[in-house]
Image: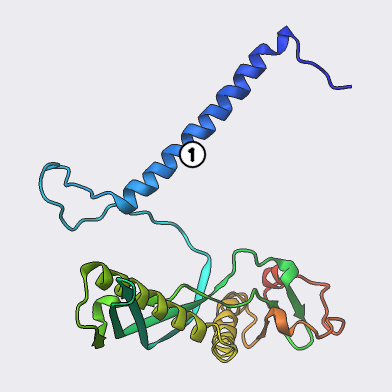
Amino acid sequence: MARRLGRGSEPWRLIVAGALLLAVVGGLLLAWSDYRDRHVVTKPAEAPEGPAVTQIVTARIAGMSQLRVARLSGIVQASASDTRWGGFLKSGRVAKMPYAVDYTVDLSGLSPRDMAWDPETRTLIVDAPDVTADTPNIDEGEGVVVERSGVLVTREAGEALGTRVSRAARRAATREATSPERLAQARELARGAIARTMGAPLEAAGQSGARVIVTFPAERGRSRERWDQSKTPAEVLGNRQ
């Protein structure tokens, strides 16, 4: 049977209600702060009534554990169309813009369990996380409109075309960056970058010439039985030759 709260529990009800109220208020303040930063014009502090100027609205710096291993860049062509007034007004735009996509590997979760040392061949095996493609960076400022269509293009239609062209360019760049061929190329470059990262402490610990083999999740079908894991990489680094 459910236990009823007596009079002595009234303070707990107030504490719980207060905590819920604080959580709701905090969430609303965060939502408003994000909306203000993104959508409300910020006036200069020294002249709040003056015109809007170019300025930094927010700036946050944080540490990163991602290792950037490759970059895909080039030119993307994107097109978009717009129809208004029941199909009477039709317009279109084709633009070319530079783009870049970075490939990273998150090493923050890498632990000794993801590594194995073979003392006979002096080989360190690293089971690394997979390579991921970041969100494409489309340089619209350097873009060029190569084709326009439409007798009359309203301001709303022009804004819609710009947004749709940008989205189409981002989708095309994402498809290219995440294609099997591009990911395979990025993994090969990542293999070398991670091997150099892991090889540096081995070199400093006196294991000059030690081999580093990097594997990714799709390559983990091999057996580990032939690798001697009696010593962890930390123990290897601790016992300098």
User: Is 6 above or below relative to 1?
Assistant: above
Kind of element beneath mark 1: helix
Q: Nearer the viewer, residue 188 or 236?
A: 188
Q: Position of residue 135 (x, y in %)?
A: 46, 72
- Reading the image, the residue beneath label 1 is 27
Q: Position of residue 149 (x, y in %)?
A: 25, 86
Q: How was this image coloured?
A: rainbow
Q: Residue at (35%, 81%) from the top-left corner? A: 80
Count of numbered labels shown in the rendering: 1
Categorize mark 1 by other alpha carbons within 10 Å: few (<14), some (14-19), many (20+): few
The N terminus, quarter of image: top right
Q: Nearer the viewer, residue 238 or 162?
A: 162
Q: Residue at (31%, 70%) from the top-left corner? A: 160
Residue 15 in which image quadrant: top right
Extreme-top residue of the structure: 7
Q: Is residue 89 visible?
A: yes
Query: With 4 as the anchor, is 109 left or right in this view?
Result: left
Residue 159 in which image quadrant: bottom left
Q: Residue at (65%, 18%) from the top-left corner? A: 13
Q: Position of residue 139 (x, y in %)?
A: 31, 77
The C terminus, quarter of image: bottom right
Q: Is residue 138 visible?
A: no
Q: Nearer the viewer, residue 120 or 107?
A: 107
Query: With 195 as the anchor, is 88 left or right in this view?
Result: left
Residue type marked 1: Gly
Q: Position of residue 237 (x, y in %)?
A: 67, 71
